[in-house]
Image (cartoon, rainbow, N blue to C red):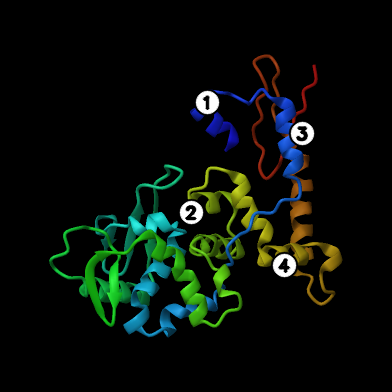
Amino acid sequence: MIRAMLNVENNQDISTFYKLIVFLKRKGEGYRPKKSKICTRQNIEFITEAPDDKYLMFKIVAVMGILGACRCEELCQMSLNNIEDLGNTLVVHIPDSKTRVSRTFTVITETYIDLYRKYLALRPAHVNHQRLFVKYTSNKCTIQPVGINIFGKMPTDIATFLKLPNSELYTGHCFRRTSASLLADSGANLCTIKRHGGWKSSSVAEGYLEDSLENKKRIGHILPNNCPSSNNSEIEHINSISSTASSSTSTISSCEVAFSQGIHITNCSNCTININISK
């Protein structure tokens, strides 16, 4: 951020100031950014338990925010033109995002679709814009669109309704972090998480995999030393993989290897080949 600011404002490129870069990295050691708290699967029951007369719009925001891993600005700019109602499925397009990566997600739960249609039916006919979220109070919608600061406060209001401790720590980034965390807990890989959230950096998505409690539990069961004696299914699975790998190595002898025009390997399956070339 400092490098970009000085480059734009003062036309000064500090990327070659190596001592300064080392100094800043040393100063940043041990720093942990403050992150929003996330909702659990049990907390998401707010969508079905909260009364519609007060929290209908909150429910739709939670549905879109969690299922689509949406930022506050994406929720604020969400348009009716970006949503396709296919009867039993809602297809939502997010064309403009912070990373310039367009995304698409679906809503297939019947309860969520009914809530969306109920909210849409309350929308005044004379609204002169296409923004999805307009202000809602006491079963009535106005023509005024919801501002971005309101979306930032919604997770706190939801946490207050659920009587969660430290409700002020549920910030506007809560929906997006909750979506990625639930996806990581379900066993999704790094590529799926990056595609879902539109992240270009792998380090961000890896953070969700690293913090996933369910992922840690799966690793703990796979490791032989932590497996209970009464449950050997995971060990048997590992042994089957090892036996498959050993049997696959025996087929390498039948592979055709030619060095005249490169290396050609055929008739191989279920094997991994590592080639190290040193000059």
* First of labels 3, 2 by sequence position: 2
Question: Tag 3, which secondary structure?
Answer: helix
Q: Which tag is nearer the camera, tag 3 or tag 2?
A: 2
Q: Amino acid at mark 4?
A: Lys
* First of labels 1, 4 by sequence position: 1
Q: Amino acid at mark 2?
A: His
Q: Amino acid at mark 1?
A: Asn
Identify the residue shown where x is 27% and y is 74%: 119
Q: Residues within 10 Å of mark 4 (few under 14, many from 20)?
A: few
Identify the residue shown where x is 30% and y is 65%: 133
Question: Tag 2, which secondary structure?
Answer: helix
Q: Residues within 10 Å of mark 1 (few under 14, many from 20)?
A: few
Q: Amino acid at mark 3?
A: Ser
Badge number at residue 164:
none
Residue carrying label 2: 196
Question: Tag 1, which secondary structure?
Answer: helix
Identify the residue shown where x is 58% and y is 68%: 169
Q: Work out how far the residue at label 3 is from the one at label 4, CA to CA, in angstroms.
A: 39 Å
Q: Position of residue 273 (x, y in %)?
A: 72, 36
Residue carrying label 1: 10
Q: Work out how far the residue at label 4 is from the one at label 2, CA to CA, in angstroms.
A: 23 Å
Residue carrying label 3: 253
